[in-house]
């Protein structure tokens, strides 16, 4: 952004502000999925380009596909449920930078054991999950050249009620799946929750394969007890069926879907104007990063009910805190509500209305005395939010 826009507040003139985007990149400290800018592609798949996936379908001695509901005895409805929607979602979220090409093997492979002996109903261990994938990929080995694929998707028939949920396998060196002399490093095993989540379960699980952590909480809190007090329905890595599943700008940057020149950074004391374009549309500045320590930052972005967020129930300026030293499911990212009284309620409904804005029912300013950071919405239009970011001299020095 050029230094062309200025704002008068009292006698003070504020200019647009530009610092090196590299100052906003936080180093990962977890060694697994985290919010660090650097993604280890020795472990995780690239998120720019086309992921080649093969989809294989399994049934069970106690749940043969011949006993599945009438319209679900073919592989086609399973593919149709997951793939076209999931694929388009990636294209939209990444501004065309990521695609998933899925090759279905259109037949059913009969697993050897009844479905509820594979461990899914008890949370499934890594060993059990590896065994399940190993058996399925061997069954399909005569029909699949695994050297052509980055990821294996395994889909159970609809009547296999013992395959309850949809975990991801990422080869971290301990549990190997091997077939035809080749290691299958990445797999998603879909479960019956796919019918509840819809195709976005494919997006969520595949983004783990690209290095993203879970943003929902592994520990329930609140009354009623829930897992969605960190980010509510913002971002598909939180609540998959949430109202605004498009990934946070922080995620899009890490995934390579945003360029460095779409990121503003504020490390110096002062007051600065930033023009934010909604993360759901392509082009423009997508976020302001305000580093707080070596691994943490406040991030500001703009949200609108567009694209993958078409059903968003809130819009405006969203402020959140990221920490690249925090593990998956422990709150590496949490949204900060515009209304200080609605922070720490553990209520996902509050998180879902967290945007700052100029409407009368909104707070226009986020103020954090601890860090010396404040954010004020100056103006809003359909295509832009303008914010004034202040960083005090007392702010944590880097
Ligand atoms: Zn997950």
Image (cartoon, rainbow, N blue to C red):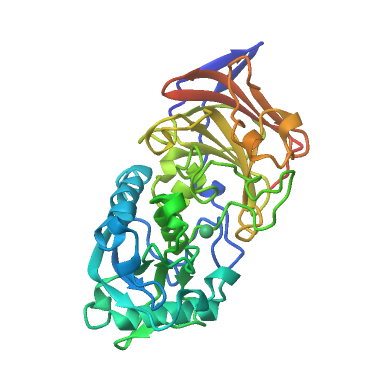
Image quarter (top left, top right, bottom left or bottom right) of the N terminus:
top left
On the image, the x and y values in percent for residue 314 come to: 53, 28
Where is 233 relative to 5, above or below? below
Front in this rendered view, residue 155 or 255: 155
**Image height of 67 relative to 97, above or below:** below
Rendering quarter of residue 49:
bottom left
Q: Where is residue 79 in the image (x, y as percent from the top left)?
A: 29, 58
Q: Is residue 43 left or right of residue 215?
A: left
Residue 271: in sight, yes or no? no
Q: Where is residue 318 in the image (x, y as percent from the top left)?
A: 57, 33
Q: In the rendered view, would you say 345 is above or below 34? A: above
Extreme residue toward the top, this view? 10
Q: Is residue 346 above or below residue 126?
A: above
Q: Residue at 58%, 27% (x, y): give it.
A: 272
Asked whether the viewer can see residue 224, the reply is yes
Number of marks in the rendered image: 0
Q: Where is residue 155 in the image (x, y as percent from the top left)?
A: 36, 66
Q: Nearer the viewer, residue 198 or 77?
A: 77
Relative placement, left or right, of 45 versus 39 is: left
Position of 249 with respect to 347 (left or right) is left
Occupied quadrant, residue 73: bottom left
Q: Which of 95 and 184 is in front in this view?
A: 184
- Residue at position x 60%, y 71% from top? 122
């Amino acid at each position: 952004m050029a230094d062309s826009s200025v704002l008068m507040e009292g006698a003070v003139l504020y200019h647009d502000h530009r610092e090196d985007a590299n100052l906003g990149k936080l180093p990962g400290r977890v060694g697994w999925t985290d919010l660090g800018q650097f993604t280890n592609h020795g472990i995780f798949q690239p998120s720019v380009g086309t992921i080649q996936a093969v989809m294989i379908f399994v049934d069970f001695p106690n749940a043969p596909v011949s006993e599945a509901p009438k319209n679900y005895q073919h592989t086609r409805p399973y593919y149709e449920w997951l793939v076209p929607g999931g694929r388009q979602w990636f294209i939209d979220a990444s501004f065309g930078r990521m695609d998933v090409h899925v090759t279905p093997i259109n037949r059913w492979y009969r697993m050897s054991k009844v479905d509820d002996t594979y461990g899914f109903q008890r949370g499934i261990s890594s060993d059990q999950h590896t065994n399940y994938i190993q058996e399925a990929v061997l069954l399909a080995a005569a029909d699949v050249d695994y050297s052509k694929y980055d990821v294996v998707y395994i889909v159970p028939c609809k009547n296999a009620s013992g395959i309850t949920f949809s975990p991801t396998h990422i080869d971290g060196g301990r549990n190997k799946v091997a077939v035809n002399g080749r290691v299958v490093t990445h797999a998603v095993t879909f479960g019956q929750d796919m019918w509840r989540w819809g195709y976005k379960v494919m997006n969520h699980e595949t983004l783990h394969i690209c290095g993203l952590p879970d943003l929902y909480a592994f520990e329930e809190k609140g009354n009623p007890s829930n897992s969605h007090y960190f980010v509510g329905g913002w971002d598909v890595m939180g609540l998959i069926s949430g109202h605004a599943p498009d990934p946070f700008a922080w995620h899009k940057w890490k995934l390579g879907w945003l360029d460095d020149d779409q990121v503003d950074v504020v490390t110096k004391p002062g007051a600065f104007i930033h023009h934010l374009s909604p993360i759901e549309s392509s082009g423009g500045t997508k976020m302001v990063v305000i580093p707080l320590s070596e691994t943490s930052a406040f991030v500001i972005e703009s949200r609108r009910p567009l694209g993958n967020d078409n059903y968003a129930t809130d819009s405006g300026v969203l402020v959140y805190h990221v920490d690249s030293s925090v593990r998956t499911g422990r709150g590496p990212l949490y949204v900060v509500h515009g209304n200080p009284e609605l922070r720490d309620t553990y209520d996902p409904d509050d998180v879902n209305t967290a945007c700052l804005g100029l409407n009368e029912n909104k707070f226009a300013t986020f103020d954090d005395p601890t860090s010396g950071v404040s954010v004020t919405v100056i103006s809003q239009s359909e295509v832009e939010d303008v914010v004034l970011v202040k960083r005090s001299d007392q702010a944590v020095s880097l």
